[in-house]
Amino acid sequence: MTTPARRIQLQDNLNRTREAIGAACAAAGRPSSDVRLVVVTKTFPASDAAALVDLGQTDLGENRDQDAAPKAAELAALGLKPVWHFVGRLQRNKARSVASYADWIHSVDRVELVDALDRALSNEALSNQASPGDAPGLPRTVNALVQVSLDGDVSRGGVAVSGLAPLAERIAAAPSLRLAGVMAVAPLGWDPSEAFALLAECSAAVRRIDPGAGEVSAGMSGDFAAAIAAGATMVRLGRNVLGEREAMA
Ligand SMILES: *Cc1c(COP(=O)(O)O)cnc(C)c1O
């Protein structure tokens, strides 16, 4: 359980963050309904995540399966079903776990991951059939964003811009995944506006493959206004809402 003081703090932070997103949208001449707020709850306890859902925040993000899986289970046990977004580096051996709770995966960056996720989701459907011999349940469709490495340094995740189209085509062809759009983190040392302008070009390339794949996940606590100005449809904010994190291991 959160303390009443923590709950009030989260409510205040959430209100201020929503106002700041609204102001950035207004400055960009966009309606605030264009931008979805994903609150990244990584390193914060499940009680904070539960309080946020209770305060009307439907979209929550996590970046490590080891933390996200138990948090999602804890909330589900409380009857709380946020829309979970997985935003971190994803290893192939975690694909099955992440596919079991995530509605959105922002960090699809290689073909092996597409195949592992698609396989995990179709196996989930098979194991959901009522009895052997029944038609398998329909696979759940998970929304997939291609993470782009804007500076080409793929060691921090993301596919190089040159590999974007083939990867997006592979997602579009995977029955259990919906190609939803693109995601990026502004590279260190880059002007965020330049980074997000390049991401907008990547988004246009993906929309040529599927006109419906228009989501652009961009913008963190430090640079979300620039991301909204460049067309972001989803901002991923942690510190703005939850406060500073302890240093991560
Ligand atoms: C942690 C994280 C965020 C949120 O960052 P803040 O600076 O806390 O807003 C956004 N995206 C990804 C991929 C993250 O890992």
Image (cartoon, rainbow, N blue to C red):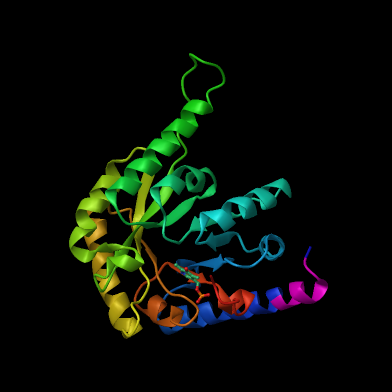
Q: What is the quadrant of residue 176 in the picture?
A: top left
Q: Which residue: 31% across, 66% down?
A: 155
**Nearer to me, 79 or 99:** 99
**Outermost residue toward the top in this view:** 133
Instruction: Report the residue at 54% width, 82% height from top.
Output: 20
Q: Estimate the x, y position of residue 18 in percent, counting from the top left.
A: 58, 76
Q: Is residue 24 above or below residue 174?
A: below
Q: Main secondary structure of the magenta part?
A: helix
Residue farthest left in this picture: 162
Residue 37 pos. (x, y %):
52, 68
Residue occupying the point 52% across, 23% down:
129
- Direction front: furthest residue: 249
Q: Nearer the viewer, residue 193 or 230?
A: 193
Left or right placement of residue 14 versus residue 207 in this view: right
Q: Is residue 74 magenta?
A: no
- Tell me which corner region of the image, top left, top right, bottom left or bottom right, holds residue 42: bottom right
Q: Quadrant of the N terminus?
A: bottom right
Q: Is residue 33 above or below residue 230?
A: above
Question: Quarter of the image holding residue 47?
Answer: bottom right
Q: Residue at x 25, y 52 (%)?
A: 167
Residue 190 drawn above or below residue 138: below
Residue 138 appears in the picture as rendered: no
Q: Which residues are magenta?
A: 2-9
Q: Nearer the viewer, residue 155 or 203?
A: 155
Residue 225 or residue 152, whichever sits in front: 152
- Whether 7 is among the magenta residues is yes
Decide if residue 12 is in sight here: yes
